[in-house]
Amino acid sequence: MHELSIVLSIVDAAEEQARKHGAAAVERIDLEIGALAGIEPDALAFAWEAGLPGTILANAERHIHYIPGRARCMDCGCQFDVQQLYEACPQCGNYFTDLLQGRELKIKSLTLTTAEEVIS
Amino acid sequence: MCSTCGCNQPSDAVTITLIGEEQTTREQQGFSLDMQGDDPQPTRHFHPGHGRRHAAHHHHHLHGHTHGHHHHLHSHDDHDHGHDHHHGKTVVELEQDILQKNNLLAERNRGFFEARNVLALNLVSSPGSGKTSLLERTLAALKGELECFVIEGDQQTSNDANRIAATGAPVVQINTGKGCHLDSDMVNQAVKKLRPSESSLLFIENVGNLVCPSLFDLGEGARVVIISVTEGDDKPIKYPDMFFSSDLCIINKIDLLPYVQFDMEKAKDYARRVNHHLEFIELSATSGQGMEQWLDWLKRKRGEMNA
Ligand SMILES: Nc1nc2c(ncn2[C@@H]2O[C@H](COP(=O)(O)OP(=O)(O)OP(=O)(O)O)[C@@H](O)[C@H]2O)c(=O)[nH]1
Ligand SMILES: [Mg+2]
Ligand SMILES: [Zn+2]
Ligand SMILES: [Zn+2]
């Protein structure tokens, strides 16, 4: 279950940002996860429930943007979508391909709630 | 107790033990991974396995502020009020790798290894593919020729570290508790205990698991994935991540080839589909067949470091 490590790393980063900006809570977090990054969406959701209570992300809305896998054939140069790390080029059947995207594991943005006291 | 902030570690916490510590702790002064001195905040608050406790402890007070959202609504006609709570919103466009902390510390480990001319190898495989057996044989073969150090990663027990210690090589056991992989912080701490000497070889045997360790850079110079012929020739496409991120694939237990269904070419072909940069070595840690190729590979990699 490395998804729990992933969630705890996210919590760490969110807390660092909250501290930096003097934020009271995180309202929303946007993640970018590649379809070939080795993260199971179900396991991530499960780890999210397990890892969050009591942290700054406890009430944050989670938005996950999945990035589809995309590769380029080293032979014919064509680009194509991939579901796996071992797909052949649809043009020439070649397996010598380079992955262009799909391994992302990123915190895109955080929406922080900052509580300021305003004299009225 | 956690040495950084004094909180209680859970019972499944990570432990890092230098085997035979009594005899070896003495020369410890003057050895530091932080010798570049360019990082004012080293590994504080990055304790694998109990990050959540820190979170819970340190941020109670932050939650206190979320009350009272609507105080100002029913106080509008009551102008003697001192102040309102306004809740501002800040969007931070972070664009930061989730594993940034692990990756940064891995880079520091890597810098240390390079500066010290240490070839660090991350050995990954399913449980029981023969990592420890291969190490035992390798250490025996290199004795007197190349100085070797070992970090053993297992969830429980020091069995593997004891096997390594029996060969005479200095070894640190990391027990990850429930953790299914090593991370760069554990390796950083283990290296501080192990103190590999200049121009040595450092073998890091990861937790037996073909999935999770693939995501965690330890700062190694090369990653070696080991499969054995008893595991089936379709392993590379069943668990592609590990093959994708490795530099060398060792196919172990070839002494058992006559007894199992294992198509060597098919296994390699599958692995190449995932990663066409992958090199292969077939061997048997038991019979010793193929060991020469592996030892040559090690020496070649070491040589490349000096270049
Ligand atoms: N026949 C044969 N057996 C082997 C070979 N290499 C290892 N074994 C056996 O495989 C079993 C597991 O070997 P280990 O070296 O402990 O494997 P490991 O990868 O370190 O295992 P974990 O640390 O538990 O993941 C032992 O019974 C070894 O004797 C080999 O080349 N041939
Ligand atoms: Mg072992
Ligand atoms: Zn895992
Ligand atoms: Zn093509």
Image: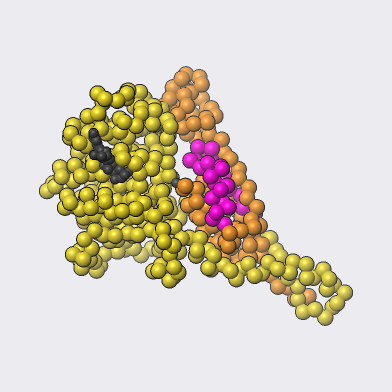
Q: Which colour represents chain A?
A: orange
Horizontal placement of B280 versus B85: left or right? left
> Percent position (x, y) of residue B266?
35, 23
Res. B109 in view: no
Which residue occupies 32% across, 35% down? B227
Q: Is residue B290 above or below residue B179?
A: above
Q: Which colour represents chain B?
A: yellow
Horizontal placement of A111 versus A43: left or right? right
> Percent position (x, y) of residue B84?
76, 73
Q: Quadrant of the C terminus of chain B?
A: top left
> Percent position (x, y) of residue A101?
51, 37
Report the residue that reaches farthest toward the left: B144
Which residues are drawn in magenta?
A28-52
Res. B42 in view: yes
Horizontal placement of B58 versus B243: left or right? right
Q: Is residue B290 above or below residue B198?
A: above
Which one is in front, B159 or A81?
Answer: B159
The part of the image, by quadrant, that contains residue A96 is top left
Q: Is residue B130 magenta?
A: no
How many numbered badges does the structure rendering display?
Answer: 0
Which residue occupies 63% across, 67% down? B63
